[in-house]
Amino acid sequence: MGYSCIELAGYGNGKIGGIPMAEYKKMADDAGILIKSSHMNPNVLGRGEKYSKENMGKLRDFWKRATEDHAILGLPYMVQPGLPSIGSIEDAQRVAEVFNVAGEETLKAGIKFGYHNHDREFGKVVSGGKSINMDRNARDGRRIEEIFITETDPQKVLIELDVYWTVMGGQDPVEWINKYADRIQLLHIKDRLVLGQSGMMNFEQIFRNFYSHGHETFFVEIEDTRSGKQFDRVKASAEYLLGADFV
Ligand code: MG
């Protein structure tokens, strides 16, 4: 199809989608595909349990173990794609603190840690708050994504911007790519289904601006594993990119 590298999902029990790490790596090597990244969320807390001083050790242990498992793959990035339970600025700051811890652990194996957004990261939280305000015109508070970017250590945490979810969060990905040019080092290139079909994504400006900051790594994402059409959509998306002079 034209893809040269992949980002994994499905890490659990030292395996990827039930396949042992070393075996997965061999499959990728045999196919000539580079494994560049892997998505995972720490599954060590209860449902809705917030990050806290008390469970920080558990979270660190998760990242330590995940790093040891992923070192086998020889990949450069490990990324958390799920938003922990957050209702206030303080909650978001605590999460940022744990991201630094995650980055400390992954760096021990020379792997960079990143965070990947959906739309709720562009909602606002206030000090002492109880929930995220998704009102696009909300004036009070701070955006969670902005707290994550500005309150994590650039040496330990990078940002993988999902451009589709940024738009769904009411924001212009190009503005974020330029405002945080040194922090947004990876992109999820995603559209509603097949790239370029909805007309709602300004991929040309997204690529031009991202490249202008010296970055180059992106992953096409099709969030569709059930229609039976996912491979057609992955292929059609590759064709869109291969035919685009800005990629
Ligand atoms: Mg994504």
Image: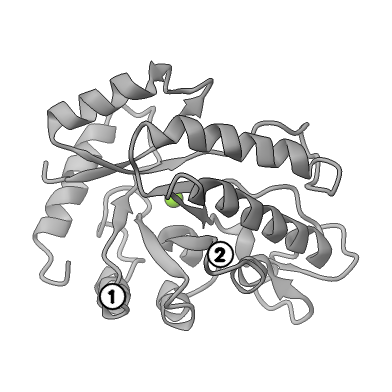
Identity, as a three-letter code, of the amino acid under mark 2: Gly
Residue labelled 2 has its Cβ within 8 Å of some atom of ligand 1: no
Mark number displayed over residue 169: 2
Quarter the N terminus occupies: top left
Which image quadrant for residue 213?
A: bottom left
Between 61 and 160, the residue placed more toward the observer is: 61
The answer, for residue 132, to whether it is visible in the render is: no
**C-alpha distance separating marks 2 and 1:** 26 Å
Quarter the C terminus occupies: bottom left
Q: What residue does disc 1 label? A: 214
Which image quadrant for residue 231?
A: top left
Between 148 and 77, the residue placed more toward the observer is: 77
| Position in image of residue 108 (x %, y %) | 51, 47
Does 184 sit above or below residue 237? below
Does 73 sit above or below residue 152? above
The residue drawn where x is 36% and y is 66% is: 200
Q: Secondary structure at mark 1?
A: loop
Residue 126 is left or right of residue 135, and the answer is: right
Identity, as a three-letter code, of the amino acid under mark 1: Gly
Residue farthest along the right direction in this orientation: 128
Q: Secondary structure at mark 2?
A: loop
| Position in image of residue 98 (x %, y %) | 69, 53
The residue drawn where x is 31% and y is 51% is: 219
Task: Give the number of the mark in front: 2 or 1.
Answer: 1
The answer, for residue 204, to whether it is visible in the render is: yes
